[in-house]
Image (cartoon, grey):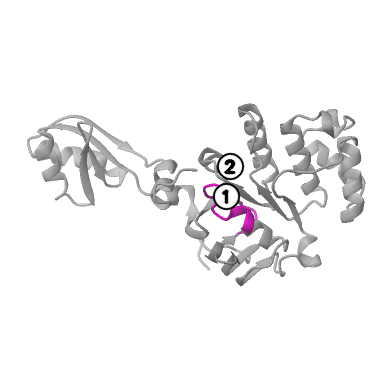
Amino acid sequence: MTESEPRHPPLVETSGLGKSYGSITAVQDLNLSVRRGEVYGFLGPNGAGKTTTLRMLLGLIRPSSGTATVLGETPGSPQGLQGVGALVESPAFYPYLSGRDNLRVMARYCGAQIPRVDEALGQVELSGRANDKFKKYSLGMKQRLGVAAALLKDPELLILDEPTNGLDPKGMAGMRALIRRIGRGERTVLLSSHLLGEVEQVCNRVGVIHRGELVMEGTVNELRGGGGILVKAEPLEKAKEIAVGLDGVEGAQITDGMLMLEADPSRAAEVNAWLVEAGLRVSELRPVERSLEDAFLELTGGETV
């Protein structure tokens, strides 16, 4: 086994997974793999099929085609669900019960020990507001209580569907910090999101879904690709002509008076030496990384999130 290979079987694995509603295909031929101990970002525009996929993984809806395993079990089986906590769409609680009492009700239903209630409230930093009625909670607090409910069984796998939806910037930052914290160690987090910054800050690996199909899976750096080198030189057209013939330069284009080279950014010094040796006047040259947004737009055909 090489260093790049996972040491354990994937916690979540799908093969050719699909879901159709009549003539409408929500998810098709989906093959994803979520490894133990990682925060996996399931990234895609609204309506791409993220929630439908999570519902299939939880056994809430049946797939139309393909297979899936969650913790080595069939989705929705009691054995598999025992190790899974999930927050899919908006959390729903009794408005006139306190946060603590809502979790106590849920603990009885899911077979969790009552002492886990206060532990889960502490994990999401709601201990100080645990006795307040749910109806008095802010949206951010309601989302955090939803995460606490998902943590009641101290699950091996935590599935979160757009947990920052509707939150203000402070609430979003708090939720991202919470996800990073609870995703440490052996626990695995599968996070669905349409927010590029969220995925970039929180996730180890990413799967991009577009119109129901997985179009890319890998680390954030793999998703971005190799980046390039930005050059300002005179004469610019001559610089382009020379650059496209250089070793390691796969393409070149002039944009806004600058030459953008498709090349490994680490070769910037070599490119500079070649251009100067050719008699060009180089006034600026710097490596640039392709943004996650650029990569996402390329993978989804320009469709925005």
| Residue 120 locus on image (x, y percent) | 82, 42
206 vs 238: above or below: below
Over which residues does the magenta segment extend? Answer: 35-52
Q: Nearer the viewer, mark 1 or mark 2?
A: 1
Q: Residue at x 57, y 50 (%)?
A: 41
The residue lying toward the viewer, choosing from 191 and 55, is 55
x and y, in percent, of residue 105 in the image: 91, 46
Helix, strand or loop under label 2: helix
Inspect the magenta stretch and tell me whether residue 41 lies in it.
yes
Disc 2: which residue: 202
- Residue extending furthest toward the bottom: 66
Q: Is residue 132 left or right of residue 179?
A: right
* Above or below: residue 281 compared with residue 208: above
Secondary element under disc 1, as helix, strand or loop, is: strand
Rounded to the nearest angstrom, the CA distance separating label 1 from label 2 is: 8 Å
| Residue 177 placement (x, y as % from top left) | 65, 36
Residue under the point 14% across and 42% down? 240
Is 70 inside the magenta-drawn segment? no
Instruction: Tell me if residue 298 can be seen.
Output: yes
Figure quadrant of residue 104: top right
Please, what is the three-letter code of the amino acid marked with disc 1? Gly
Q: Are marks 1 and 2 in contact (CB under 8 Å)?
A: yes
Kindly identify which residue carries mark 1: 41
At 82% from the left edge and 52% from the top edge, which residue is drawn? 153
> How many numbered circles does the render carry?
2
Sooner in the amino-acid sequence: mark 1 or mark 2: 1
Query: Closest to the observer: 76 or 27?
Result: 27
Q: In this orientation, does residue 10 appear?
A: no
